[in-house]
Image (cartoon, rainbow, N blue to C red):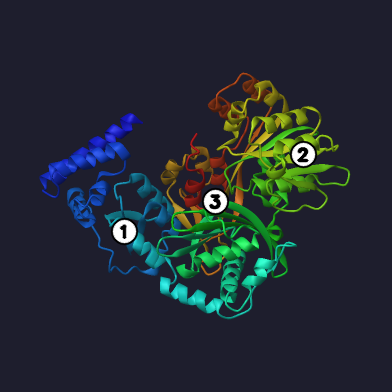
Amino acid sequence: MAAEKNFQINISRRLGEMLVSSKLINTKQLHEALDAQRAQGGKLGHLLIEKGYISEKQLLSFLSEQFSIEFIDLVNKEINEKVLQIIPENIARRYNLIAVEKKNNVLKVAMEDPLNIVVLDDLKMMTGYEIKPVFGSESDIMTSIDRFYGTKSSKEALDEILKKTGSGEDDVSIVEDEGDSDDIISLEGEENAPIIRMVNLILSSAINAHASDIHIEPTYKETRVRFRIDGVLHPQPAPPKKFHNAIISRLKIMATLDISERRLPQDGRTKLIVQDREIDLRVSVLPCGPGEKIVMRILDSSGLKLKLDDLGFEPENLAIFSKCIKAPHGVNLITGPTGSGKSTTLYSALATLNDPGVNIITIEDPIEYNLEGINQVMVNTGVGLTFASGLRSFLRQDPDIIMVGEIRDFETMNIAINAAMTGHLVFSTLHTNDAASTITRIGMMGVEPFLTSSTMLMIVAQRLVRCICKNCKENYEVKPELLGSLNIRKALVDKNLKNGKIILSRGKGCDICAKTGYKGRLGIHEILEVNDEIRTLISDKAEVSKLKAAAVKNGMLTLRESVVRKLFQGATTVEEVVRVTGSDVD
């Protein structure tokens, strides 16, 4: 790490000396910027601009001349909509770039860093065009992204939401908890009716868009509303900043939170009825500098997929999963980051096993979906009901199958393993990056390797990838050599060759998918089945790399191989392969 930092500083020094030679900055200014770079990191150019020693456009014009790369001024630049849609909005925002022109098979892209070869290769593979990078001002690119990708200007969006909040019937009705309705009634007078309609509009719009989360966050100048749809945040028309506190108060009252407390985080929940569907809403409030931010998780049981065949399992993975969840005893773990579909997989497994002859008990924080015929308990730390204490009580309830929402500590893990050793089938989740590293995580909790090896049945690592919109799906050709950077085995590439080329798919963007090219998500899975060889390695405290190598040798599909299969099947895109499994390199 130190060597990398020194290398970066040496590169910066050479750039600085060139700027001094060109009399754009002086030696003192260079040394001050280099000292700041050593102390806080960052790019030399950004530091020089921040200190006011050089303007952004002066720097870019200089770099353009030095590297013989065109500099483009985006301030008054008009961009054809078809050209714009070649690069999806989330990629443009992630790398701060924007497509500006297309001639024949060459796509001109304005970039903050047109020397980034990795990004250029990704763009070439993703779009199928030759990429001609040009320098663009960082701020101008960000402004252009907001200007061209946004379907409406800020004023138009504001006018629209004010118009909607001033007329029409609410699509959302609130199911109030008993004894907590007084404050709500006080907000339903004539003066506050627009706020109620505005909140209901935001909620109904998010639910109708199949969003999983709603973010309402303040900046110093405005209120920003974003919906997480298929795992990606999308900006929405926002209400005026003057309404922000009233909106937060309305949502707090709905979730039975303290509207007078603005200094501490708060968590709550409420229920909504939307078009005869019951929706659970988990509400989290966080105090920030400009005001309070609120994030709401939407839990819609009507959209819950409980059939294992609908979750995206590859055939061999589905066979292993089905076998392990039907074992008489042992531990099955589902791992992955927040929002990777772990709960859906667990609920699907329990729904498959749900039978009047089986006693199934779960402890969750919170209960996301109610399953008929299953005893579900919610964690309540305020009265001492934790995962560990609940799990201890479960063992006196004559259970056959136990599900623990999440294992966070040694005590819970130890009780779960002991439950498995005494004849119970246990399901739970952990937050780890892949299946093999879960073994190391369990060891770090303090669990003896022989206990892990004797009770573990399988570990499933999973992610969610966006599916290509079926309405606007199109095929395109890619040269096989361009897939090299995706770490795809040559045998798999050769298997999918058609006349010497690979045929992939992408979404053009349409009204049905809100111009994103994606609609819905599928799971990708990496299942480490604990067989005799893996048990021996666990007992011997083998390194993660050895565990993974042994699992792959025994037929385990990695996350990258799972998503690549879906790429070749035409279910997802190269962009999703890179986004979801960018770090999964064997």
The mark found on residue 499 in the picture is none
The tag earlier along the polypeptide, 2 or 1, is: 1
Choose top left, top right, bottom left or bottom right for residue 11.
Answer: top left
Secondary structure beneath label 1: helix
Choose top left, top right, bottom left or bottom right for residue 451.
Answer: top right
**Disc 2: CA contacts within 10 A as few (<14), some (14-19) or many (>=20):** many
Instruction: From the viewer's side, name the closer residue of 235 and 248.
Output: 248
Identify which amino acid the numbered label 3 is placed on. Leu
**Disc 1: CA contacts within 10 A as few (<14), some (14-19) or many (>=20):** some
Q: Which residue position holds label 2?
A: 402
Identify which amino acid the numbered label 1 is placed on. Ser
Whether residue 111 appears in this view of the structure is yes
Circles 3, 1 touching at the beta carbon (< 8 Å): no
Q: Is residue 173 above or below residue 45?
A: below
Q: Which residue position holds label 3?
A: 264
Q: How far from the left and from the top, in percent, is residue 170? A: 64, 75
Alpha carbons under labels 3 and 1: distance apart = 34 Å
Between circles 3 and 1, the one closer to the viewer is 3
Q: How far from the left and from the top, in percent, is residue 477? A: 45, 54
Between circles 2 and 3, the one closer to the viewer is 3
- In the image, taking residue 532 as reference, residue 167 lies left or right, namely left
Q: Which residue position holds label 1?
A: 139
